[in-house]
Amino acid sequence: MAKIGVEVEGRFIGLRTLFLDASELEQRDLVNHALANREVQQIYVSDPLNLLGIGVNTVFPMLPSLSTKYLITVEVNSLGSAPIPEWMNIILNVDNLDVWKLRKADQVKFSDQLNVLATTVQSMTRTVPEDFNGDFTLYFDLPERQP
């Protein structure tokens, strides 16, 4: 369900954001209506099923055109082999429940045979349900499309 609220996770904390599920992007009228007369700075698309096919701009051609006015952030669980478009910001959702057992000074490490990324838990932003207070869900009575 589309929502508008303030981003509380990641790099763009504090931005007024339109939150959408990837499946809602097919509803161009919903997206346009949600953006009308609202001071949105970012469009955040949750895409856990990888419907967008990151790197394939033809799947949802609306996104590149919206990127001229809004920051576009897409949350995915995996990335394919296609390059990430320059206009798109990615949040890669890594599902490992052991992270919740770590203490502030403990570290998280991602590695392959040649590269390592590491950070301490205290360097991360923790979000709790109360952080979403103030978001509001958008309900639409969209006009019927004319044939």
Image (spheres, rainbow, N blue to C red):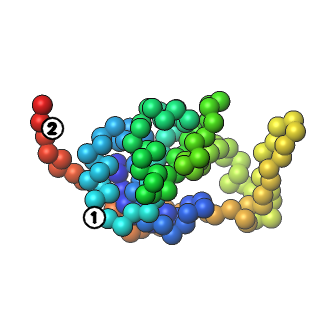
User: Where's residue 131, x and y in %?
Assistant: 49, 67
User: Where's residue 18, x and y in %?
Assistant: 40, 57
Identify the residue shown where x is 71% and y is 48%: 98
Rendered view: 35 above or below 54: below
| Residue 138 relative to residue 76: left or right | left
- Pointer 2 or 1: first along the chain: 1
Identify the residue shown where x is 52% and y is 51%: 73
As measured in the structure, the alpha-carbon distance from the residue carrying label 2 to the one carrying label 1 is 22 Å
Q: Which residue is mark 1?
A: 37
Disc 2 secondary structure class: loop
Rendered view: 93 above or below 136: above
Graded by Cα atoms within 10 Å as few (under 14), some (14 to 19) or many (20 or more), the crowding at tag 2 reads few
Amino acid at the residue labelled 2: Arg
User: Where's residue 13, x and y in %?
Assistant: 55, 66
Graded by Cα atoms within 10 Å as few (under 14), some (14 to 19) or many (20 or more), the crowding at tag 1 reads few
Q: Is residue 35 or residue 130 the one in the foreground?
A: 35
In which quadrant is the C terminus drawn? top left
Q: Quadrant of residue 143?
A: top left
Q: Which residue is mark 2?
A: 145
Amino acid at the residue labelled 1: Asn
Identify the residue shown where x is 68% and y is 54%: 100
Q: Quadrant of residue 95?
A: top right
